[in-house]
Amino acid sequence: MTPCRKFTRQSLARHRGQIPSHTELLVRPSCGLVVAEIFMQTTVVNTPGIGMPLPAQQQAALIKLLSDEDPTVYGAVRDKIISLGSDTQIWLKPCQISSDPTLRRHAQEIVRHFDRETADTRFMALCLQDEDKIDLEKGALLLARTQFPEINVTAYSALLDDLAGELREWLAMSDPAQRLLERVNEFMFGKLGFTGNMENYYDPENSFLNRVLDRRTGNPVSLCVTFVLIARRLGLPVSVVGLPGHSVCRYVSSSEEVYIDVFNLGKLLTRNDCIEHLNRCKHEVRYEYLQPMTARRILARMCGNLEQIYTEGNQPDDAARVQRYLFALTR
């Protein structure tokens, strides 16, 4: 075990480059000693984005502490940096490519925290919008950014554009619905390999559109969203229908109505098949069960899935986060 060093205030000041105005004490439980670690007190008001920039010497002191592997030290430094607000990213981001692996990892974690806060704010703002202003694609990708803040939303929209362009080459738009949807299924589930994730149904990544597109697998509602976003680019009249406990897509033209079980490789269903499903599962047959969901309801269903997964997986922070989204979406 590496012994903990005991510092006086003066020796620590020399170690950090200057004598600060205040000392906070951190306990290192591994050796039971109280070690004085210097936290520079600043004139910055501890409100994100407000206050004067942190002086360079104090930035350097915090960065030096970030290279400490002790989890107690890192936790305290992390809390201090976060309390100073998101402007600290200006001098933290270069540390993400440091040759020191500990500093690099810690800096990445803190920057990711700020990025997730920003993503959370943006998605919450969308959740609070009026129904007619909520865009399904934007909403699904902003939800994904709350978990994967580093993703390029524009790039995923471009990928959907590309997939729709490929699909166009497979279709004769004048074909009857049955043949048209069979060809869509051949492309989506044959060529591209999309499939329902039956082996890891409760994997939270099944609910995030970026991971569905990356891995070509997901849960019923996320696969329906993917199917709809590609099909609508070609003008196909497809929507998402929320049966209790299961989501399917619905194709409706002036003369035909077909339901598509996207989770089960695009199996084509009739309205009666859906009613039989409701009866089998002991659900009352309601008109709204067979009607298209709005973008708000689709996003609420995606968040509801995540809330259940996080709650049952003992991830209270993530569960509380998506509960906030649900509250906003169902208000």
Image (cartoon, rainbow, N blue to C red):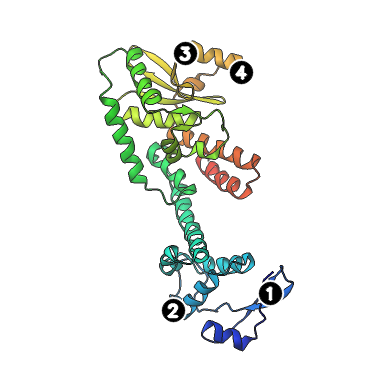
Q: Amino acid at mark 2?
A: Ala
- Under mark 3, the amino acid is Arg
Q: Which residue is mark 2?
A: 56
Relative image position of residue 149 (x, y in whole percent): 44, 51
The residue sitting at the right extreme is: 32
Residue 116 coordinates in the image, percent (x, y):
48, 54
Expressed as whole percent of the image width and height from the top left, the position of residue 55 reads: 45, 79
Please report whichever mark, 2 or 1, sits nearer to the chain's N-terminal start: 1
Tag 4 residue:
281
Identify the element where label 2 is drawn.
helix
The residue identified by callout 1 is 3
Q: Secondary structure at mark 3?
A: helix
Q: Is residue 20 visible to us here?
A: no
Side (left or right) of 12 relative to 182: right
Which residue was labeled with disc 3? Answer: 271
Q: Label 2, label 4: how many angstroms apart (C-alpha)?
A: 64 Å
Mark 4 closeness class: few <14, some 14–19, many ≥20 residues within 10 Å? few
Residue for point 38% across, 19% down: 251
| Residue located 61% across and 89% down the image | 10
Residue 318 showing in the rendered view: yes
* Amino acid type assigned to the residue bearing label 4 in the image: Cys
Find the distance from the CA under tag 3 to the CA under tag 1: 72 Å
| Front disc: 2 or 1 | 1
Q: Quadrant of residue 211?
A: top left
323 or 70: nearer the eye?
Answer: 70
Few, some or many residues within 10 Å of mark 3 (<14, 14–19, 20+): few
Mark 1 residue type: Pro
Q: Nearer the viewer, mark 4 or mark 1?
A: 1
Q: Is residue 98 above or below residue 291?
A: below
